[in-house]
Amino acid sequence: MTEHFEPQKVLEIALKVKESSKKLYEALSLKSSGSLKNLWDYLSQDSELHSKVLKEMTQDSEAYVIYELSSGEYDAYLGEIIPSFRYTQEIIVRKTRELFVSDLEAVEFAIYVTIESILVYSALKNYIVPDKLDIFNKIIGDEKKHLTKLNLVKRDLWK
Amino acid sequence: MLENYNPGEILKIAVEVERNGKDLYALLELKSQDSQARQIWAYLKQQEEAHQRTFQEMLSHQKNYLIVEFSPGEHESYLRAIASEYVFTQDLIKKHIKAEFSSDIEAVNFGISVEKISILTYSALREYIKKDRLAVLDKIIDEEKNHLAKLKGLKRTIEHTGI
């Protein structure tokens, strides 16, 4: 069944994804050197910053989230992508334990996590109080920067 | 793999991805043993064909659709990055047209990943579309979201019934 959608619940999952991502990127940084280490450090620091914002949003959700919104296909779409996002969090935890067979695999996994995050955050935007949207848009903008950086590293690793 | 994609080139890639997507879904429709799955593949095939036509129209009349003067910046870098992932997806679609999936669930999961990257690519392309033509692209984005929901539904059915 499609999961019943509650914006606050999505924020809680987003927070867990961020906290788990931070641990994963820290673990990857420990195993890396040079520009790749810099990348994981950068992603880890941004994950920490985003965790703080998302924690504030979940703790004071009434100030950030619109609960009354006409339901429609958009809700169905968001309801469909939430379980994947939760699953993503589970895989991040597993990957933090197991890590990866190559740098390319690690970068591709980080791209997958970033794509999932952009999809969920973009869908969640409709449920954020308008005067708090800037805060949320900043996170989406940062995720897009992450994807850009990760894609450049992936291109280098492919060479 | 290193390309500097511009909005016009992304339209060209979109035509190709939708065409290949249509071919892949046609193949899956043909191979599927289950009527519900067959209906969904047939529906997706028709939708991709319609999207291919729309993107072809946009590509053929770029001046009517694309904002010509756009200041380069972070969004441009993001568009290039997401386009690069989109091209990679296109290569995978071609690969899967040649080589069959090992299971129905693998095919559905692949379809879901194609819809996701399409949603992100077309959403990034929105910034370059003239305001009075945005409805055309928004319709496609909404349909891709709907496809994603349908594929997720099919995935649940397969997982529960093992079709």
Image: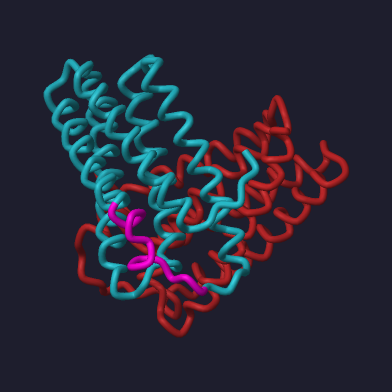
Chain colours: A red, B cyan
Residue A109 in picture, x, y percent from top left: 60, 38
Q: Is residue A17 visible?
A: no
Residue B152: horizontal and vertical position, in percent? 29, 39
Where is residue A80 shown, x and y percent of the image?
31, 47
Does residue A71 appear to the left or right of A105 in the view shown?
Answer: left
Outermost right residue: A34
Q: Residue at x 46, y 51 (%)?
A: B10
- Quarter the C terminus of chain B occupies: top left
Front residue (pair A55, B12): B12
Position of residue B38 measured from the top left corner of the image (x, y, whole percent): 16, 26
Left or right placement of residue A123 versus residue A43 in this view? left
Q: Image height check: is B95 above or below A155?
A: above
Question: What quarter of the picture does the N terminus of chain B occupy?
Answer: top right
Residue B65 among those drawn in magenta: yes
The answer to whether one can see residue A149 in this image is yes
**Would you say residue B16 sits in the magenta stretch?**
no
Q: Residue placed farthest to the bottom in the image?
A: A131
Q: Would residue A102 appear left or right of B113 to someone viewing this image?
A: right
The residue positioned 17% from the left and 32% from the top of the image is B42
Q: Which residues are magenta?
A: B57-69
The number of numbered discs placed on residues in the rendered structure image is 0
Identify the image quadrant of residue B151. Answer: top left
Q: Residue drawn 73% across and 35% down?
A: A157
Q: Residue at x 48, y 49 (%)?
A: A116
Which residue is nearer to you in this view: A159 or A118? A159
Assign the magenta stretch its main secondary structure: helix
Q: Is residue A64 above or below residue A108?
A: below
**Location of residue B21 (image quadrant):** top left
In this view, the residue in front, B51 or A125, is B51
